[in-house]
Image (cartoon, grey):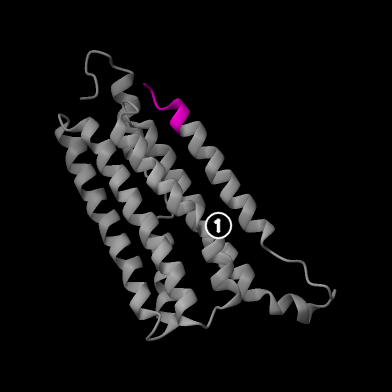
Amino acid sequence: MNTSRVEAFSDGVFAIIITIMVLELQVPREATLAALVKLAPVFLSYVLSFLVVAIMWVNHHHLLYAAKRADARLLWSNNVLLFWLSLIPFATRYMGVNSTVPFAVALYGADLASCAFAFTWLRYCVNLHHLADEELSAYNRGKLRKSAYSATLYASSVPLAYVSVYLSFIIFVLIPVLYFLPERKLAERAIEKRDHPADPIA
């Protein structure tokens, strides 16, 4: 099977996640600046999570385009990723209303770490489609290390939240910055291979 249904299903889940997050932004009863300021932690949590989900969607798009087929490994690794992503709206709201509570911040970090580890697994499954391409395999190994490093860094935010929630917040901001630019090379390499049938993707 090709990956068109996987992409369509995943895009729908991503869209629902973002919709749920914005619906969690409660309108204050008082039309004053002070009332809006009180919502700042919730709004900033939303902005952070939106950025994380958006960057992950962009990279997910490029990653799935490079996949040759929707095999069992890819399907289940993608479902695991979507499961952890679907918990982001809850974790976002929970941290937003408890932004100084270590447990709430740690829970948010644990969910992001789970998303990152799941994305690493998905990347590994897609990489298996390109083992015969030495250049692409070398590139993929580097990206796998980066994904594993990011997941580990997210995981470290969980215990750090009990030292200082601000240390965890630094990690939450740092990792999206590292992934701000989409990963184009993998998709571009796949396009190049598809445009030259005599040199198919391995």
Q: Which residue: 29% across, 47% down?
A: 121
- Residue found at the far right of this picture: 31
- The answer to which of 176 and 101 lies nearer the viewer is 101
> Is residue 34 shown left or right of residue 98?
right
The part of the chain drawn in magenta is: 1-6
Is residue 167 positioned above or below 51 on the image? below
| Label 1: how many Cα within 10 Å (few below 14, some 14–19, many 20+) | some
Q: Quadrant of the C terminus?
A: top left
Is residue 10 positioned above or below 43 on the image? above
Q: Which residue: 59% across, 69% down?
A: 44
- The answer to which of 110 and 132 lies nearer the viewer is 110
Instruction: Judge whether residue 182 is colored magenta.
Output: no
- The answer to which of 132 and 106 lies nearer the viewer is 106
Q: Position of residue 33 (x, y in %)?
A: 79, 78
SS for dot 1: helix
Q: Amino acid at mark 1?
A: Phe
Q: Quadrant of the N terminus?
A: top left
Residue under label 1: 50
Q: Quadrant of residue 154?
A: bottom left
Count all numbered tags in the image, as a single digit: 1
- Residue found at the far top of this picture: 198
Q: Position of residue 131 (x, y in %)?
A: 17, 33
